[in-house]
Amino acid sequence: MDEHIRGVLRLISARGGEGSLAGGSALDEQAAESDVELLDAYSRAVIGVVEKLGPSVVGILRGGDTRGRTPEQVGAGSGIVIAPDGYVLTNDHVVSGAASLMVTLADGATLPASVVGVDPDTDLAVVRAQASSLPYGSLGNSSTLRVGQLVIAIGNPFGFQSTVSTGVVSALGRALRSRQGRLIENVVQHTAPLNPGNSGGPLVDSRGRVMGINTAIIMMAQGIGFSIPSDTARWVVSQILTHGRVRRGYLGIAARGRPLKRREARLHGLDNEYGVEVLQVDPRLPAGRAGVRVGDIVVAINGQPVQSVDDMHRSLAEWPIGEPLTLTALRGAELLKIQAAPVEMS
C-alpha cells in the first residue's frame, strides 16, 4: 500500500480514536447539543412572533381600478392592523387607484375597507376596515435596529395568506426613490425573502414589534428586500390621522444640485462641496416673495448645510409649516440670509 495512503488512514484512525468519527467525543456532543438548543431558541422566537403578530397581518384585495389597468396588473397586497378599530397600515402602491378595497383577516373573514389617507412620497397608506376589536401590532423603534439582527416578514405573497420568511438586517440607512421622485430616507435593507403580494406587510423583530413596512424588492436578485422604517411610518400615520394627509413644506422653487467653486467656498468659509442652484421661482410663493432669485445657490437652511435637492426636501419636511426659516444663499460674490415661511405643498 502506498505510504501516503497509509499516513492518511493512520490520521483518520487517530481522529476516530479521539471520537470525531467514532461516535463523537463528549466535547463534540456538547457542541452539537448547544447548536440544537440555539436552533430551538431561534425556532421558538419565530413561532412566538408569528403567534403574537400573525393574527394582525391582513391581505388587501382590490376591486377594479380607476386608472384603466387590466386585471392582471391589479394585484393584491398585505397590511398590518395598527389599531383595534380597523386601521391598517400598508403601501400606497397597494391601494392607489383602487375602485374598492377588501381586507382579508387571518381567520379568513373578508371586510370592506376604505382609504383614510396616502403618502406616495414614502409609499405608505392607511386604510380602515369596517370592524372593531381586531388584533393589532405595535410600531417599534426602528432606530434600534442593528445590522445582522434577526427579522421576520409576514405577508401574502402571490395570495398565499400568512406566509412567513426570515432573514437578517443587511444594511441600514439606505435610500430609495418614491414614485414621485422624492428620496425615502433610512430605508431598511434585509434578507427575508419577499415576493409580489408581500408589499405592505410588516417586517418584525424577535419581540414581535413592527420595525418596517415591506415596500420593494430588486427583481432577479435574491435576499435583497427593502422596508420603510417604523419611525417614518409612525410620523406618516400621525399626519394622516390628524390631517387626512401628510403636510410638507414648500417654498415654490425648482432647483438642482451643483458643485461649488473652491474659491466661493473658501471666501465665505463654507464646508459645502455642493449647493442647490435655483432654476425657477414662483413669485406668488414664499421664496419668490422673500426675494429668492433664479441663479441663487442655496448652501444652508437654518444653518445646516444643503448640498442637494434631497437635503432641501429633508429640511422642509422637518420644519413646521408657516414658521419662518433662514435660507443661506450665494448670489454672485455675496452670501445672503433670506427668511421665508414654507406653505403646505398642495
Image: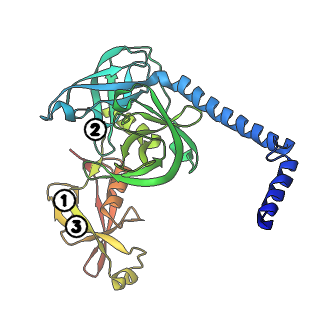
The answer to which quarter of the image holds residue 24 is top right
Where is 211 relative to 258, above or below? above
Identify which amino acid the numbered label 2 is placed on.
His
Mark 2 packing: few (<14 Cα in 10 Å), some, or many (20+)? many
Q: Earlier in the sequence, mark 2 or mark 3?
A: 2
Residue at the left extreme of this rendering = 68
Secondary structure found at label 1: helix
Q: CA distance from mark 1 to mark 3?
A: 14 Å
Q: Residue at x 37, y 80 (%)?
A: 265
- Please identify, in this view, whether the residue under mark 1 or under mark 3 is nearer the observer: 3
The answer to which quarter of the image holds residue 270 is bottom left
Q: Which residue is mark 2?
A: 93
Q: Earlier in the sequence, mark 1 or mark 3?
A: 3
Secondary structure found at label 3: strand
Viewer-side residue, 137 vs 322: 137
- Please identify, in this view, whether the residue under mark 2 or under mark 3 is nearer the observer: 2
Q: Earlier in the sequence, mark 2 or mark 1?
A: 2
Marks 3 and 1: in contact by CB < 8 Å?
no
Q: Residue at x 59, y 33 (%)?
A: 207
Which label is found at residue 315? none
Q: Which residue is mark 1?
A: 289
User: Left or right of 40: which side holds 121?
Assistant: left
Which label is found at residue 278? 3
Counting from the top left corner in percent of width and height, residue 40 is at 67, 32
Q: CA distance from mark 2 to mark 1?
A: 36 Å
Q: Is residue 195 visible?
A: yes
